[in-house]
Image: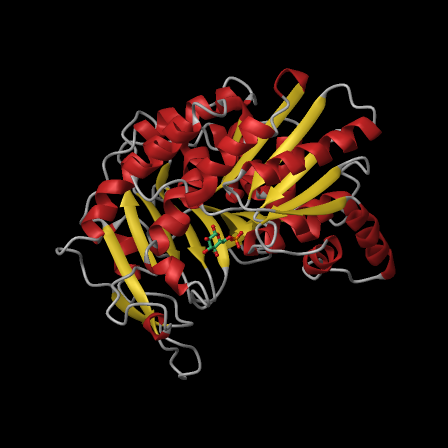
Amino acid sequence: EFKENTAIVVFGASGDLAKKKTFPALFGLYREGFLSPTTKIFGFARSKLSDSQFKERISGYFKLPNEADKEKCSKFLELCSYVSAPYDKDDGYIELRNQIEKFETSRNVKESHRLFYLALPPSVFTVVATNLKKNVHPESKGLARIVIEKPFGHDLESAKALTQSLAPIWKEEELFRIDHYLGKDMVKNLLVLRFGNEFLNSQWNKDHISSVQISFKEPFGTEGRGQYFDDIGIIRDVMQNHLLQVLTILTMERPVSFDAEDIRDEKVKVLKAFKPLNNQDILVGQYTKSEDGSKPAYVDDETVNPNSKCVTYAAIGCEIENERWSGVPIVLRAGKALNEGKVEIRIQFKAVPSGMFHNISRNELVIRVQPNEAIYMKLNAKLPGVSTSTTLTELDLTYSNRYKDFYLPEAYESLIMDVLHSNHSNFVRSDELEVSWALFTPLLNYLESDNAPVPEKYPYGSRGPKNLSAFLQKHGYVFES
Ligand code: BG6
């Protein structure tokens, strides 16, 4: 189902995020037939560019493997225009409004549908949001939606301040806070997997599950983003948001329905049940040069303080104090410059009574979010044939084997589609944001204090800090022999 005649405005249109994510996502939706050809797309930024320079710039980021794609690209570019103006003056917004109205009149639009995507740093969120509301919001003549991107604050206090600065201007139902992990297909699958399968639903608790892990591994360092990262670290970059969101969906109670508020109510409830994070339950690391010397250390980046204690790897132990989870150790871990790129969830089940078996492995459910989406359950079976030995095998749902002809949208494509349909299920509500910062802020303060532990060094391209295995064992994970 199409939304017709929508005006989409991308702010920060000449910036990195817009080029790498927002415009490729809009083009992807268009290419796959999910964005109506009656849509109008505006880029808005300070850089002085002509329409054609702008189009050339964004199309440089599209993958166009064949002629058909190239043709779609030129059709898509016909929908786009560019407005160059400062963010803090009325003029550019008035110009934008005039252009949108011209488009709407030409299409005989009775009820406006306007989507404003702020691919901008938080320092200008409020000024742009204010000017948009003042000059470009259709008010009683239609609907407006505003999308903002992380970081939503640096800690609890700044996150609250941001929420409070936006709240009087834009209503919560008009506001979409993106956490792009919520747009990943496997993350969206979690609710169905958990609540749609009785064999998992009935076992999903402390009586059967012995530990939970969510891990995020990236094979590259902060390349080019050192200055941004040094002030942020891996916990703010991916853990307080992406991994915690995944964990929340993995552990919340059954929502009454798929309705956005039902889902987000449950997310907030489970977040409130987390035990405060313990400063001792953490392992931190920072990468050094690769063993062969070809890849730089974190501190080799010229924009980074050479004595930086910034954490590029963290593993955190946590626990949820409610009837379902009390006592089950949970580990979130994330690192840059590791030996591979992978995001996965690992649920380890309790051991069966050994009784008749001398040595039998535990079941483990692995949900691989990326790359190569897969769900597999480690399962014990008798070795086929005359043998009576047991073997550990897998029930395996690897998407690329099972779903050959499906188009898996990029996270951003799926989220922009949600915004077009006003579906908030996969966006972060303000109270959710607050509880997640409340959980992490004391730990972040500790890590930035004089008592902070010194990050353990690990070479670029390695598996991470040496102490990881011991840390995981301490937090309940059983390594099977
Ligand atoms: C971003 C972080 O939010 O997520 C990046 O700022 C990180 O540092 C990225 O690389 C990971 O996203 P994805 O979709 O590539 O796993």
Residue most extreme to the left? 451
Percent x, y of residue 260: 53, 23
Judged left or right of residue 258, residue 323 is left
Residue drawn at (51%, 46%) of the image: 120
Asked whether residue 177 appears in the rendered view, the answer is no
Against 301, residue 28 (above or below) is: above
Report the coloring of the rendering.
secondary structure
Res 274 → quadrant: top left
Q: Is residue 280 above or below residue 189?
A: below
Q: Which image quarter is the N terminus in?
A: top right
- Locate residue 163, reporting x and y percent: 39, 30
With 93 as the anchor, is 76 left or right in this view?
right
Residue 119 is situated, as x and y percent measured from the top left of the image, at 54, 46
| Residue at x 38% of width, y 81% of height | 291
Q: Is residue 70 above or below residue 41?
A: below
Total residue callouts:
0
Can residue 136 be seen at all in this image of the molecule?
yes
Question: Which image quadrant: the C terminus?
Answer: bottom left
Q: Position of residue 479 (x, y in %)?
A: 35, 57
Toward the viewer: 128 or 449?
128
